């Protein structure tokens, strides 16, 4: 409860911001997009990780307000990227389970796209398997509604939750993000390597793109490139960049 009231205050005081982590096309190393990661700068406790506050806030009605704030703030980030001349890159936004199921979600996204004049193709929403597992029919319907807005959808942390390959095939998804726990072992562990390779091939067979997350070493990137992975993300490529450092950082990495 205390965290919730602190979070409400933080939102009023503009103490939440986004950090953007670049994603590259693994074939040519071009930055093709970013993932928006929420950050809370607490006046006393310093930076609080979303792993600490999201699970707590998810139990309160405030989380959905914060989720909507993230979407609107992401639109502003896309406009800021535009102004810096980065007009092609997409921005991936994490959706929480409660937000995904909120009947107001689609209308809100649509209003934001129109209000900020953002090309829907530059917006992606990341969903986890856990979010989708509740009721697969309902989930697929919501996903279709979201896709009709012209935005992209990806499945995040793939491989860590419940995933029915059969349902996956019928879902209107553009990308699968294979969880970093599988990437960690690909250079040393033959089992991990086999899982990643099989996942890449399966995703390609479903005409989707595959993203590898959590790449921390050049050897992992090289292995993934050899395996035919499409998109790469991780500390080796770039740590998440705070919004206010974008202008100075992007010139160096793009
Ligand atoms: O940024 P970091 O790697 O510490 O993120 C920790 C967790 O918080 C990850 O699971 C990430 O998906 C989640 N997360 C980060 N930002 C957001 C956000 O804006 N909304 C939601 N729902 N989850 C987020
Ligand atoms: O669950 P999700 O994939 O949205 O989580 C994103 C989180 O992963 C962010 O908090 C981000 O800081 C973290 N992350 C991004 N790249 C790496 C990496 O290379 N290694 C590790 N350990 N974490 C990473
Ligand atoms: Mn994510
Ligand atoms: Na992930």
Image (cartoon, rainbow, N blue to C red):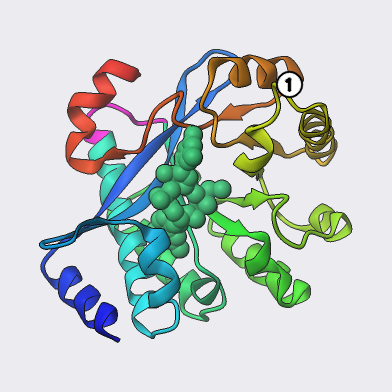
Residue 53 in the image, given as x and y percentages of width and height: 36, 68
Q: Between 243 and 140, which is closer to the camera in this rendering?
A: 243
Q: Which residue is drawn at the image coordinates 73% and 21% (left, top)?
A: 228
Residue 231 in the image, given as x and y percentages of width and height: 59, 29
Q: Which residue is drawn at the image coordinates 79% and 37% (left, top)?
A: 199
* Whether residue 195 is visible: yes
Which quarter of the rendered picture does the C terminus lie within? top left
In the drawing, does residue 251 fall left or right of residue 181?
left
In the drawing, does residue 74 fall left or right of residue 107?
left
As helix, strand or loop, the secondary structure at mark 1 comes to: loop
Quarter assignment of residue 221: top right
| Residue 92 within the segment the image draws in magenta | no
Examine the rendered structure and indicate whether residue 150 appears above or below residue 167. Answer: above
* Whether residue 123 is visible: no
In the drawing, does residue 17 fall left or right of residue 229?
left
Q: Residues within 10 Å of mark 1 (few under 14, many from 20)?
A: some
Query: What residue is shown with label 1?
Result: 228
Q: Which residue is drawn at the image coordinates 72% and 23% (left, top)?
A: 188
- Magenta segment boundaries in residue numbering: 82-88
Magenta span dominant secondary structure: loop
């Amino acid at each position: 409860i205390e965290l919730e009231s602190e979070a409400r205050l933080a939102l009023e005081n503009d103490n939440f911001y986004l950090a953007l982590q670049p994603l590259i096309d693994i074939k040519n190393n071009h930055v093709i997009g970013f993932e928006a990661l929420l950050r809370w700068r607490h006046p006393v406790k310093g930076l609080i990780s979303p792993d600490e506050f999201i699970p707590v806030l998810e139990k309160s009605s405030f989380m959905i307000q914060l989720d909507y704030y993230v979407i609107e703030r992401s639109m502003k980030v896309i406009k800021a990227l535009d102004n810096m001349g980065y007009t092609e890159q997409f921005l991936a936004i994490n959706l929480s389970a409660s937000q995904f199921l909120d009947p107001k979600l689609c209308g809100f996204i649509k209003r934001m796209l129109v209000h900020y004049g953002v090309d829907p193709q530059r917006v992606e929403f990341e969903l986890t398997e856990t979010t989708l597992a509740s009721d697969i029919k309902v989930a697929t319907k919501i996903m279709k509604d979201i896709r009709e807005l012209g935005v992209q959808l990806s499945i995040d942390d793939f491989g860590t939750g419940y995933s029915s390959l059969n349902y996956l095939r019928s879902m209107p998804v553009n990308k699968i993000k294979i969880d970093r726990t599988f990437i960690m072992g690909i250079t040393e562990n033959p089992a991990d390597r086999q899982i990643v390779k099989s996942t890449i091939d399966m995703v390609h067979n479903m005409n989707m793109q595959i993203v590898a997350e959590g790449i921390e070493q050049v050897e992992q990137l090289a292995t993934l490139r050899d395996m035919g992975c499409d998109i790469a993300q991780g500390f080796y490529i770039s740590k998440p960049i705070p919004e206010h450092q974008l202008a100075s950082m992007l010139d160096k990495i793009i």
